[in-house]
Amino acid sequence: MLELAAADGVTKVVATPHLYWQHDGAGQELQAQTCFGRFVQELKETRGSDQNALPKLELGGENSLTPGFLEAVAQGRCRSLGGSKWVLVETTPMLPLSALLQAADWLKQQDLRILWAHPERCFALHRDLTVAQLAVENGIRLQVTAGSLLGEWGQSAQRAAQGLLALGCVHVLASDGHDMKARKPILSEGVAKAANLMEDKQRGYLVHELNNTVEFRGASTVCKSDIAGAITDYLVKLSTK
């Protein structure tokens, strides 16, 4: 998967294993950390200097929004993204937005912020996309799956993903890579789709995770603007708020 991601132009991969806190979340977190450390060590031993050609690795976690997760946060056992204040959170498709907003308010008191994983699959957004704006106003940021823009998660998720782009509510575009078959760690196709949808001289590109994909190499020469650099600056500014 790392080789496939590298070929796609990805330079860094944040592994976000699922953490279902209602089912021994602490044990899952420890297992994820142990497996990650073991994999990194094996990579060093088997690839040697060749591993430099692969994307850099960091460990995060995709936290299921449950009472167990909030309890873990209260106990200081929550895994954020790269040790930052941003926590990747997934919700069930049927979760009411009010529950997410309440969790976001409580997490703010713990100096944490929610990055909402694949919101385009949420039924509430299928009915009314403007609820995403309410989430953003409450400090939540949205991470859309690149494949959703291509219809890989069905028409409803595709319409929602493209609608979120139009509203300017997409903050991260992620591969959501799981394997080498159905859910590959590929970003370039989704990034290209987003760029085609959202190219606008006044608003710029609403794609914030490029990972140096091949479509954007040399873009500054064509459009006289360092798109990737501007996006990186935006992310740095966002992460320090």
Image (cartoon, grey):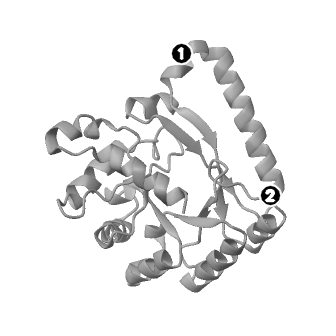
Q: Is mark 2 on a helix, strand or loop?
A: loop
Q: Distance between the residues labelled 2 and 1?
A: 34 Å
Query: Callout 1: few (<14), some (14-19), or many (20+) C-alpha neighbours within 10 Å?
Result: few
Q: Which amino acid does label 2 sit on?
A: Arg
Total numbered labels = 2
Residue 189 visible, this orientation: no
**Horizontal relation, residue 66 to residue 239: left or right:** right
* Nearer-the-camera pick, 121 or 130: 130
Quadrant of the rendered structure where residue 94 is?
bottom right
* Nearer-the-camera pick, 66 or 113: 113
Residue 50 tag number: 1
Residue 32 tag number: none
Residue 78 locus on image (x, y percent): 75, 59
Q: Mark 2 points at which residue?
A: 77
Identify the residue at horizontal 64%, vertical 49% (top origin).
60
**Horizontal relation, residue 14 to residue 160: left or right:** right
Q: Which amino acid does label 1 sit on?
A: Asp
Identify the residue at horizontal 37%, vertical 37% (top origin).
212
